[in-house]
């Protein structure tokens, strides 16, 4: 009996250590991504927790850290999309400035404009500029053709240019 309980504790400690490592390494990226979909901090935190739980339950094996991060973000995207369907009637919080890139917090108005884009375009812009993924990586992550991703990104840039010019009198 004592041996079984010590095995359970060891397993729980290992799971806690893996969860802590994932949270430190990828927690901010997952939370930002979920928030970019949901615009609600509580839901984004739930997605972060659900993503970590899926990882701990499945215990997938990855080739490298980039593959691990891509898997986590893909799970977070899927969970976020499911949550959007589930929460159609919930009110959304405004995007907080502390989720913007640390390098350029003064560009909050740009991310406000990104939120005005259609979901596929906003998703590609977020992954490209905020998470620093290449078009090829985004295509693999979203299950789209690389040319489609480049096209979405190009159209999003044009739309952002017009939105920023109209709403903020900002020229690029």
Image (spheres, helix red, strand yellow):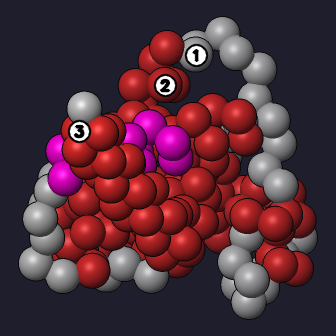
Whether residues under marks 2 and 3 lie with C-beta atoms below 8 angstroms apart, the answer is no
Can you tell which mark lies on residue 4?
3
Residue 57 among magenta residues:
yes
Q: Secondary structure at mark 2?
A: helix
The extreme bottom residue here reads 103
Residue 41 placed where, x, y %?
73, 41
Separation of residues labelled 1 and 3 (CA atoms): 42 Å
**Residue at position x 82%, y 66% in the image:** 98
Residue 73 among magenta residues:
no
Q: Main secondary structure of the magenta part?
A: helix
| Segment colored magenta | 48-59
Q: Nearer the viewer, residue 146 or 20?
A: 20
Q: Quadrant of residue 53?
A: top left
Residue 172 placed where, x, y %?
70, 84
Q: Is residue 141 left or right of residue 94?
A: left
Which residue lies under the disc numbered 1?
87
**Position of 64 relative to 59 (above/below):** below
Q: Is residue 132 left or right of residue 101?
A: left
Q: Is residue 110 left or right of residue 83?
A: right
Which residue lies under the disc numbered 2?
83
Whether residues under marks 1 and 3 lie with C-beta atoms below 8 angstroms apart, the answer is no
Separation of residues labelled 2 and 3 (CA atoms): 38 Å
Q: Tell me if I can see residue 116 in this picture.
A: yes
Upstream in sequence: badge 2 or badge 3: 3
Separation of residues labelled 2 and 1 (CA atoms): 6 Å
Q: Secondary structure at mark 3?
A: helix
Q: Is residue 35 left or right of residue 119?
A: right
């Amino acid at each position: 009996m004592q041996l079984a309980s010590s095995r359970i504790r060891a397993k729980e400690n290992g799971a806690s250590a893996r969860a802590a490592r994932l949270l430190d390494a990828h927690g901010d990226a997952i939370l930002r991504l979920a928030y970019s979909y949901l615009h609600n901090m509580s839901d984004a935190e739930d997605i972060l927790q659900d993503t970590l739980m899926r990882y701990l339950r499945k215990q997938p094996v990855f080739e490298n850290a980039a593959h691990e991060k891509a898997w986590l973000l893909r799970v977070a995207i899927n969970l976020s999309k499911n949550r959007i369907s589930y929460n159609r009637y919930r009110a959304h919080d405004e995007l907080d400035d502390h989720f913007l890139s640390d390098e350029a917090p003064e560009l909050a108005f740009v991310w406000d404009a990104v939120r005005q884009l259609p979901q596929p375009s906003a998703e590609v812009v977020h992954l490209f500029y905020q998470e620093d993924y290449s078009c090829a990586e985004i295509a693999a992550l979203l299950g789209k053709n690389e040319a489609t991703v480049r096209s979405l990104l190009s159209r999003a840039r044009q739309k952002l240019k017009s939105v920023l010019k109209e709403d903020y009198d900002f020229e690029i």
